[in-house]
Amino acid sequence: MEPGDGIVIFLAPHCKSRARIRATCHDRLDHAAILSFSHQSANDRAHWLSSTVASCRVDPGERHFLDEPAYKDPSSPDNVLLENSSFGTFRATKVQKPSNSAPLDPTFPPAFGHLCQRPKSFKAAQETMGSVSSPEMAWWKDGVAYQVYPASFADTNGDGLGDIPGIISKLDYLASLGIDIVWVSPMFESPQVDMGYDISNYEGVHAPYGTVEDMDVLIAECHERGMRLILDLVINHTSDQHAWFKESRSSRDNPKRDWYVWKKAKVGPNGERMPPNNWRSYFSGSVWEWDEPTQEYYLHLFAKEQPDLNWENLEARKAIYESSMRFWLEKGVDGFRVDCVNMYSKPQGYEDVPIVDNSTFVQPGPVWANGPRIHEFLREMNMEVLNNYDSVTVGELPHTQNPSHVRKFVSAGDKQLNMVFQFDIVDLGAGKKDKYCFEPWKLSRFKEIVATWQQFIEGTDAWTTVFCENHDQGRSVSRYASDDPKYRELSAKMLCIMLCSLTGTLFVYQGQEIGMVNVPKHWPIEDYQDIESVNFYRDMEKKCQGDKKVMDYVMSSIQVLGRDNARLPMHWDDSDFAGFTKRKEGAWMRVHDLYPEINVAKQESEPDSVLSFWKEMIQLRKEKREVFVHGSFRMVEPDSDETFIFVKQFGQEKAVVALNFSGTEQTVNLPEKNVKLRVGNYLDAEAAESQSGLGTKRVLRPWEGRLYLAAVD
Ligand code: GLC
């Protein structure tokens, strides 16, 4: 092959060796594109299968592995035009069908091993790309993801609860925002003790949300728009109403008894019945629930209605893979956000944790995270299921602070997960002992966290995520910046600049794009519905016997950190109940007082709104994806507790981001000289910039953010 030549490999839908082929190409080829077309019609597939391997010219430096649909250019049968939503048009031309275009041999590489050039190490590939992250571009790396919380997104049938047709009705809105991947939180059959994270049937849909057929439509409509759809995978536990648990608890010798974790009682000092150990559940109280009929305790790390599955049992694992994963992958979903991904393997000794709180028997200390077999289970899950699909996984990874440990989960070579949500950023402010006992934090710590989780993939084959909101967290404007009416829009835009310029897959949570803020401070606990906050509040009330000072502190902590902050209905317009529902009694959850001021319709009509700003920033992130999505990260002045300045770089491109995280003016020094302002969150940013002279000194106004582009010297 001539220099600059490459090959394009078309993978059959659900090709079993997809990952192996990709890995082999990755090592051996300078220029290659791997295309899968699992979402194309049968006719298209047949057409492409007739030319499974084609050599083509790829622009030097291009070395992409695309998992996106490919289209034949009708104007020229010899050309291939590779288009997709997140990459634009891939520059591949002059396709020649090789004379021996045999169908793809699943035992790669003999059929086209001769096309492979000299071995190429990962490091060398990185140098070519000038990137610190994997040069492999994938739809799930460059795509922007958006999390939908079904209960609170859009209600179309007037029952006060969001639904799947509601999600479908807003797909064009998401497309206009620049979203490529939609993540839908649990919409499965569930008694809703924990808002759907208690699943009673993986293969069914919670009736008020719709039907499995609605999900088929949602999948098709997403794909139609070039978007991917990922679902929540909640397999640490099921609902106690799941058929498996009903069988398991029916008798001690039921064949499914061992699918959950059952233990005998301990005997206390006075002969009383005691739980097997002193572990405290996430939702207060013990992790053990006594089952009177069978005289044993079962384990539940969360609510007692969420019994933990026993991952030690192979049969249970196989059933999990089949029902919760294959069922939906076969329908065409593109992957999963994996709930509690490091909790499946429990330390089998089930020993007590050290006592840190003398006032109660149960003690915090999540020793169940990262148990001895966790990586083995994840590898198995990948091998058995995920590897056979063009799918992505993003794991929820709490209690894991060590970068090398996190890398173990997401190293591409070790085929466990594609990426994770590491918790440091969202744990900021959460109490060490009790989550809802707020502890103040400094910006220097925030910056250290961002830097750590940006840099931990450098020089490795791992991948990272960028996020600061989800359905379990307070709103970012209120938590990390200012929701003071004077500053809240500036704050939302400033955070947007930061997020859109960081390396990794960007996840946006519904409402973040319009700058939704936390629950108003005066709302009482009765307006909160989340089991976690409400249980904690009631627990503390008992412990401190309603002491006003303590309870005010607990309430103010819940107001900052509570999960309900993110679960209030989405603000679509300024009509009743924010246009979320037509039900005259209103939505299932109280609507935020500020919806007439903060809503989609208003912001769509305003060119300077937070929403318009997000659209522009997402666009810019895509235009300059090398430097923003894949670039290296360097922070300057790590000790400043007011400003956050960092440099992103990819090959010849650099960007400098300067953010003021304070309500007062700050003077900063930019780390680069030849920079040009590209984006600012103040309307007169350009004018302010032109007054700053030629040097590197800049004055940033309250909550001001500026993004500069620079050429490498
Ligand atoms: C995850 C979910 C959370 C849920 C918990 C139990 O942390 O994000 O909402 O309560 O798992 O499934």
Image (cartoon, rainbow, N blue to C red):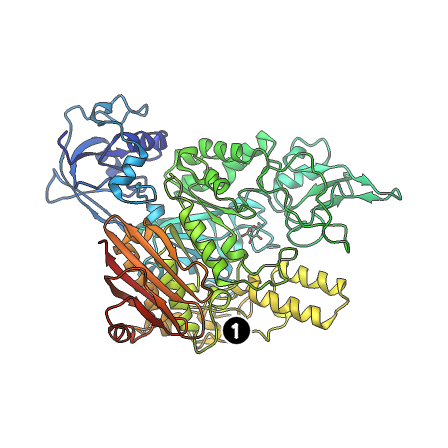
- Residue 277 placement, left or right of 365: right
| 329 in relation to 713, above or below | above
> Given the current orientation, which residue lies at the most extreme right position?
270
- Residue 579 placement, left or right of 41: right
Give percent across and percent down for residue 205: 51, 50
Give percent across and percent down for residue 452: 45, 50
Residue closest to the eye, 176 or 328: 176
Residue at the (44%, 40%) spot, across then down: 410
> Given the current orientation, which residue lies at the most extreme top position?
110
Q: How many marks?
A: 1
Residue closest to the eye, 96 or 212: 96
| Label 1 C-beta lies within 8 Å of the nearest ligand 1 atom | no
Give percent across and percent down for residue 166: 43, 60
Residue closest to the eye, 380 or 678: 678
- Residue 405 placement, left or right of 499: right
| 475 in relation to 684, above or below | above
Residue closest to the eye, 421 or 628: 628
| Residue hosting label 1 | 584
Name the kind of residue labelled 1 in the image: Lys
Residue at the (72%, 72%) spot, across then down: 548
Residue 171 in view in this figure: no
Q: Residues within 10 Å of mark 1 (few under 14, many from 20)?
A: few
Which quarter of the image is occupied by the N terminus? top left
| 80 in relation to 614, above or below | above
- Residue 25 placement, left or right of 450: left
Give percent across and percent down for residue 346: 62, 38
